[in-house]
Amino acid sequence: MRYLFLSIVALFFISCSNKTPENVSERVNQLIAEDNYTQALDILTNTDPQQSDADIPKLKEKTYLNYGLYLEYRGPEDSTMRDRMTSALEQYIEVLKLNPDNQKARKEIQQIMGIYQTMPDKSPGEDIVAELNKLGFDY
């Protein structure tokens, strides 16, 4: 009986323990592949970097970048192009907050803003433009 009790307690502790870094990285990569970016970001936000060897900032950068690309090129069918582009810009801004040298995010921002500049009556919004200006863009 004692052996059974100890086995159950051990199993409980194993099942409730934090995910290993490999599991966090694997799970986030799986969610990215499935276009489940908000779930991936939730996992990354709730993972304690002190208890994980996973490179959380790098995984966040990757997730935000892929989320932006998804929104820009394939996004939800029930959203407008303006909403998708604005949301993509928000994701690219998050990428650059983590890594100001991310050239892919910079190129995508330039592409989207170049399109906005051809339409004088359209803008992604003052808050987006202000964030871009803080990151060194001039719009």
Image (tube, grey):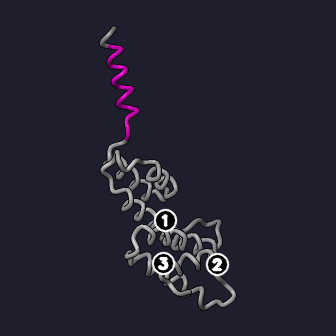
Name the residue type under label 3. Leu
Residue beneath the point at 40% across and 64% down: 62
Label 3 – label 2 distance at C-alpha: 14 Å
> Which numbered disc flags the more N-terminal residue, 3 or 1?
1
Mark 3 near mark 1, Cβ–Cβ under 8 Å? Answer: no
- Binning the other alpha carbons within 10 Å of mark 1 as few (below 14), some (14 to 19) or many (20 upward) gives many
Q: Which residue range is magenta in the image?
A: 4-18
Residue 78 versus residue 116: which sits nearer the camera? 116
- For marks 3 and 2, the one nearer the N-term is 2
Q: Secondary structure at mark 2?
A: helix
Q: What residue did someone put label 1 on? A: 67
Helix or strand or loop: what does disc 3 sit on? loop
Numbered circles on residues, count: 3
Q: Residue 55 appears at what percent x and percent y?
A: 33, 57
Q: Does residue 130 sit above or below 15 in this rendering?
A: below
Examine the image and state in which quarter residue 60 appears: bottom left
Q: Which residue type does callout 2 highlight?
A: Glu
Characterize the magenta stretch by its predominant secondary structure. helix
From mark 3 to mark 1, how far is it between C-alphas?
Answer: 19 Å
Residue 129 counted in the magenta span? no
Secondary structure beneath disc 1? helix
In percent of the image, x 44 and y 81: which residue is there?
A: 107
